[in-house]
Image (cartoon, rainbow, N blue to C red):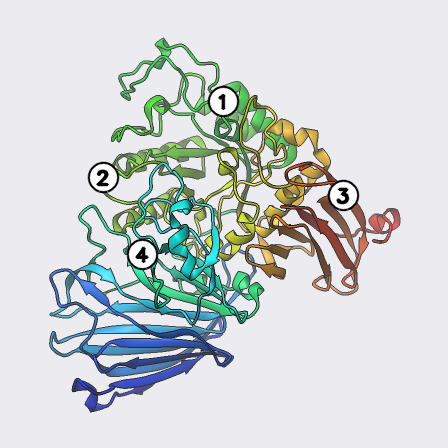
């Protein structure tokens, strides 16, 4: 059900705007609640300029807009305003899955048409001002003097008002898998070298270049987030900082030739976004990125379901087992290498017996799917060879019986999840894509985890360039033809496209749990991801590691830098409709009481309330399970212990609930005693106050299940 109201007025700019040397035009709009104000003008050089304020405080100082074109005078200046239209839009829409049941899309808009007199061509800059922030984009109508053009660089500026505290990762054309750094803007240059750590594919570009979503905090308590929305047929935007003048400017990802976008009118850029508030919780609750995307493209979405899964994965990530079937071959040619004549290495994880055990575990504990990596031929020489024909996505190793295992899973009420590692050979993946998806459909798979590890083929292309962004979306829309959901790893970071294409059910696109098995993630990492990476969409973070010391390995190795209770909390604080219980089954069998929370916690929500939040420090969030009165709460902290205190006033008045609190033990510590936890149960109401002690890099999880008559008799009141 929608409630839509549109009001349009046309403002003709002054005729003086056609003469250079005069200020052509000045217009402003406010957000629906009047707290945000956008001012737009064309300066005496004919350059578009905007500025943004919040509650009377300057957020973005006067900042220029424009695009530099290849072999062309460009779209930087010489503009005059010929038209400006303002309008109001208000609707309520329901996501296929999400943090809330419905989302209000309410904004005031200004669309400014600018004429570049010398070149005789027009562009439109469209601004949408919401209560929680600003979105703007460039639009290029079809016209004789602007038809095909090549972007050399986009020069959208974000002029900061001071030396803000920023939470950033290095700008890079090929990876987002970096630890976050907290610093002043002026300190980025000096810290950049240390922030760039090794990755399978990486291309940094500037000593002050950073990635979006960029979260900042001002000295006077404003929270500012810069990102982009609806990244379609365009290069991913980074931000390059002029650290003398404290001005960020857009920096697009180039292609193999150094060009940053091939455009044909009519076309448009993605939205550039600024989310702002004086309350950090509002940043987390913002739906601006989703609202700036188009409505769902599919009529039938009944096949798109949230998924809770386990997988044959962690034992390979940690080094206990291998993806490869044999050690006898060092060069594989698909169709020619005969694996029946090779000797199994004894470490191959994706074998029939092991997968059946995982299926049994999933069925016993109510999981939807089982991911198996390393099931298909080619893993012996898959990485680092710049190999084109690397996988065919349909041929299993001798010890993996596709039909038998899928039939076995079906008997148990479980599905297998497909894995497509492309080794970044994108030409090869597209060559096989229809065949691979048909193979999935024929064998009962309805979800795929894809990967793009390594340098892109075609060689010279980058993970976040226009060509690759078009590929990622092609893979998602093609998957929809086969009713398949996609979870892409190493792909471009999300920009809200899951609203339009909800079978894009997850992405990695950041440093996830796998790094806990490598160098480890910083304790504050997951207090930042909801403010940064998750602004664009959910992440397949793969939480749930109970054996944080990875005790099944011998010798020196990494450890998980959280407590066990914090791992539980991540199922609530790290929103995703795709949640993995990432540890080995035997780890959960050692802690069945704590494992109960992972089994109970929902995947899809009617409501979400951010109770406490400070980027880099802590987050506490409560979520109401879809179609029920049950709530789940999660709280996490950084390297500092803290107390979380809140009232359950979000519960329905007059009802009683069984509260089960999974908290850090009194002696818990992420380094000294990570698996110490305690569980408390009692009857609560919406007036009950909860207090939980969080250890260093600790957390808590709380389930609130509507009490039955027998519960009210057998369970004591919360104290």
Q: CA distance from mark 3 to mark 1?
A: 35 Å
Residue that badge 1 annotates: 321
Q: Earlier in the sequence, mark 3 or mark 4?
A: 4
Q: Quadrant of the C terminus?
A: bottom right
Q: Which mark is on residue 533? A: none
Residue 533 in the image: above or below residue 483: below
Q: Position of residue 653 (x, y in %)?
A: 76, 65
Residue 280 in the image: above or below residue 461: below
Name the front one of labels 3 and 4: 3
Name the front one of labels 2 and 4: 2
Name the front one of labels 2 and 3: 3
On screen, residue 222 versus residue 73, left or right, reads right
On screen, residue 45 versus residue 668, left or right, reads left
> Given contact means CB atoms under 8 Å apart, are the residues at marks 2 and 3 in contact?
no
Q: Nearer the viewer, residue 197 or 575?
A: 197
Q: Position of residue 152 (x, y in %)?
A: 20, 59
> Given contact means CB atoms under 8 Å apart, are the residues at marks 3 and 4 in contact?
no
| Element type at mark 2 | loop
Residue that badge 4 annotates: 232
| Element type at mark 1 | loop
Residue that badge 3 annotates: 666
Name the front one of labels 3 and 1: 3
Q: Earlier in the sequence, mark 4 or mark 1?
A: 4
Query: Which residue corresponds to the image point at 20% horizontal and 69% vertical from the top-left?
Result: 75
Query: Which residue corresponds to the image point at 34% horizontal and 84% vertical from the top-left?
Result: 27
Q: Earlier in the sequence, mark 2 or mark 3?
A: 2
| Element type at mark 4 | loop
Q: Earlier in the sequence, mark 2 or mark 4?
A: 4
Q: CA distance from mark 2 to mark 3?
A: 55 Å
Residue 362 in the image: above or below residue 67: above
Q: Which mark is on residue 458? A: 2
Q: Is residue 1 visible?
A: no
């Amino acid at each position: 059900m929608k409630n839509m109201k549109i009001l349009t007025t046309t403002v003709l700019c002054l005729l003086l705007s056609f003469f250079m040397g005069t200020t052509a035009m000045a217009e402003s709009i406010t957000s629906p609640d009047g707290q945000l104000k956008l001012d737009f003008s064309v300066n005496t050089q004919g350059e578009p300029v905007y500025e943004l304020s919040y509650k009377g405080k300057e957020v973005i100082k006067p900042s220029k807009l424009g695009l530099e074109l290849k072999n062309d005078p460009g779209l930087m200046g010489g503009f005059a305003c010929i038209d400006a239209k303002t309008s109001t839009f208000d609707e309520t829409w329901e996501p296929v899955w999400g943090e809330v049941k419905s989302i209000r899309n309410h904004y005031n808009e200004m669309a400014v048409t600018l004429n570049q007199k010398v070149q005789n061509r027009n562009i439109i800059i469209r601004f949408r001002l919401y209560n929680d922030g600003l979105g703007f984009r460039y639009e290029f109508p079809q016209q004789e003097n602007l038809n095909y053009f090549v972007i050399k660089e986009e020069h959208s500026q974000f002029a900061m008002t001071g030396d803000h505290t920023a939470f950033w990762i290095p700008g890079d054309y090929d990876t987002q898998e970096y630890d976050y750094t907290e610093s002043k803007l002026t300190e980025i240059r000096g810290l950049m070298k240390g922030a760039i750590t090794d990755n399978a594919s990486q291309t940094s570009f500037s000593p002050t270049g950073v990635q979006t979503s960029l979260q900042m905090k001002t000295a006077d308590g404003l929270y500012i987030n810069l990102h982009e929305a609806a990244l379609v047929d365009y290069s991913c935007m980074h931000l390059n900082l002029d650290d003398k003048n404290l001005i960020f400017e857009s920096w697009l990802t180039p292609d193999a030739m150094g060009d940053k976008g091939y455009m044909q009118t009519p076309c448009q850029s993605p939205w550039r976004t600024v989310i702002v508030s004086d309350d950090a919780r509002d940043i987390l609750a913002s739906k601006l990125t989703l609202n700036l995307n188009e409505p769902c493209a599919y009529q039938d979405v009944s096949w798109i379901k949230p998924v809770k899964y386990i997988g044959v994965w962690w034992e390979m990530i940690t080094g206990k087992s291998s993806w490869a079937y044999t050690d006898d071959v060092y060069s594989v040619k698909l169709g020619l290498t005969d694996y029946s004549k090779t000797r199994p290495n004894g470490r191959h994880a994706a074998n029939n017996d092991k997968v059946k055990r995982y299926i049994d575990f999933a069925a016993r504990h109510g999981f939807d799917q089982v991911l198996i990596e390393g099931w298909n031929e080619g893993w012996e020489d898959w990485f680092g060879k710049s190999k084109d024909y690397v996988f065919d996505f349909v041929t299993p190793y001798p010890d993996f019986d596709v039909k038998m295992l899928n039939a076995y899973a079906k008997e148990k009420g479980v599905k297998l999840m497909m894995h497509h590692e492309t080794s970044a050979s994108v030409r090869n993946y597209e060559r096989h894509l229809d065949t691979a998806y048909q193979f999935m459909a024929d064998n009962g798979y309805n979800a795929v985890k894809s990967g793009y590890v390594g340098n892109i083929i075609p060689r010279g292309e980058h993970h976040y360039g226009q060509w690759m962004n078009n590929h990622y979306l092609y893979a998602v829309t093609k998957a929809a033809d086969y009713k398949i959901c996609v979870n892409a790893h190493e792909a471009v970071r999300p920009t809200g496209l899951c609203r339009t294409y909800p079978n894009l059910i997850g992405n990695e696109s950041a440093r996830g749990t796998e790094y806990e098995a490598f160098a480890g993630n910083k304790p504050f990492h997951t207090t930042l991801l909801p403010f940064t990476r998750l602004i664009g969409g959910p992440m397949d973070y793969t939480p749930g590691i109970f054996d944080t010391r990875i005790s099944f390995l011998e010798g020196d190795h990494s450890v998980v830098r959280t407590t066990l209770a914090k791992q539980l909390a991540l199922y609530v604080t790290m929103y995703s409709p795709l949640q993995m219980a990432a540890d080995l089954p035997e780890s959960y069998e050692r802690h069945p009481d704590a494992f109960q929370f992972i089994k109970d916690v929902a995947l899809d929500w009617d409501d979400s309330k951010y109770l406490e939040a400070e980027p880099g420090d802590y987050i506490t969030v409560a979520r109401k399970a879809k179609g029920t009165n049950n709530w789940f709460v999660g709280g996490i902290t950084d390297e500092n212990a803290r107390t979380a205190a809140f009232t359950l006033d979000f519960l329905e008045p007059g009802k009683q609930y069984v509260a089960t609190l999974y908290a850090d033990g009194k002696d818990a510590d992420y380094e000294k005693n990570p698996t110490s936890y305690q569980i408390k149960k009692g009857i609560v109401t919406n007036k009950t106050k909860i207090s939980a002690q969080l250890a260093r890099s600790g957390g808590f999880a709380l389930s609130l299940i509507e009490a039955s008559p027998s519960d009210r008799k057998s369970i004591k009141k919360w104290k």
